[in-house]
């Protein structure tokens, strides 16, 4: 077991996809997991039920991570039951427009940038007091390969996640002396409902052809990378980005 039993992990956007897979893996490794969700209470409840059925501990807490007061309330709920948050996995997906720059408004691009960074700022601010007090913490942000490898129509997502990635490096530098590591997991295309909505067949085939491992990522592949960064044993990696893309892009 990599994570010490008793560590508390908050996973934002954990009712489905990468977030749900991450919640399950962290619970398997002995952490008590907070399954944050925005509106899918039934799905979040199912993730909690799955974890408990496997012998783990989990609780579902609703909060819009773009709202600082909601985030503070969520962390207070967790503190009342389990104490502070030791591990933050910020995975919640902020909606974005898929279109060219020429067709995009500033509200669409600037709005995504603002919401992305506001959410990361709010959740990080909320969990830091406990981490700094105990001199130990793990912060993992979900990025995207699109921050470094552009794809048509994805400028809003790629640009906002690039900002998040640089934000993580600055935090890694500042928080390292306090025993807190900060890293980014940047998936390539992931097999999911959202991916099916965004990727047409031709694009998907091109991506498969460009991937040495011959398939797109599954949520569990990404969750394993997150779990590595979240673990007790990962004590000397900070300010890094893990590309989980099957070799589609190497950097």
Image (tube, rainbow, N blue to C red):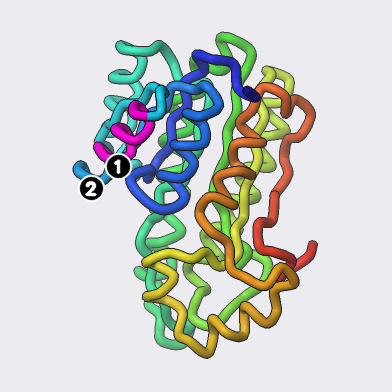
Highlighted range, magenta: 44-53
Q: Residue at x 53, y 50 (%)?
A: 220
225 relative to 77 in the view: left or right: right
Q: Residue at x 25, y 37 (%)?
A: 45
Please state the horizontal and vertical placement of residue 95, each as a whole percent of the image.
Answer: 35, 62
30 relative to 20 in the view: left or right: right
Query: In the image, is residue 227 above or below residue 92?
Result: above
Please state the horizontal and vertical placement of residue 186, each as a whole percent of the image.
Answer: 62, 55
Residue at the bottom extreme?
202
Q: Say which quarter of the image contains residue 77.
A: top left
Q: Say which quarter of the image contains residue 208.
A: bottom right
SS class, disc 2:
loop
For disc 1, the neighbor class at 10 Å (few under 14, some 14 to 19, many from 20) is many
- What label sits on residue 40 in the rendered view? 2
Please state the horizontal and vertical placement of residue 71, each as a whole percent of the image.
Answer: 33, 32
**In this view of the protein, which residue sits in the foreground, 46 or 16?**
46
Query: In the image, is residue 201 above or below residue 85?
Result: below
Question: Can you identify the residue that label 1 sits on?
Answer: 37
């Amino acid at each position: 077991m990599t994570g010490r039993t008793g560590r508390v992990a908050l996973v934002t956007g954990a009712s489905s996809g990468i977030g749900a897979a991450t919640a399950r893996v962290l619970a398997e490794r002995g952490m008590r997991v907070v399954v944050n969700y925005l509106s899918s209470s039934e799905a979040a409840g199912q993730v909690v039920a799955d974890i408990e059925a496997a012998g783990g501990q989990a609780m579902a807490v609703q909060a819009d991570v773009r709202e600082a007061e909601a985030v503070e309330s969520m962390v207070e709920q967790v503190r009342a039951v389990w104490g502070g948050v030791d591990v933050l996995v910020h995975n919640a997906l902020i909606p974005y427009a898929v279109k060219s720059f020429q067709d995009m408004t500033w509200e669409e691009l600037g709005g995504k940038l603002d919401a992305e960074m506001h959410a990361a700022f709010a959740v990080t601010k909320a969990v830091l007091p406990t981490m700094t007090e105990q001199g130990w913490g793990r912060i993992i942000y979900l990025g995207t390969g699109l921050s470094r490898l552009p794809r048509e129509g994805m400028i809003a997502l790629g640009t906002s996640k690039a900002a998040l990635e640089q934000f993580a490096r600055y935090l890694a530098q500042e928080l390292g002396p306090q025993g807190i590591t900060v890293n980014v997991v940047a998936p390539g295309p992931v097999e999911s409902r959202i991916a099916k909505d965004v990727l047409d067949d031709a694009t998907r085939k091109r991506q498969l052809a460009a991937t040495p491992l011959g398939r797109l990522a599954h949520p569990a592949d990404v969750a394993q990378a997150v779990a590595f960064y979240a673990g007790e044993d990962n004590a000397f990696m900070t300010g890094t980005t893990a590309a989980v893309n099957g070799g589609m892009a190497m950097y």
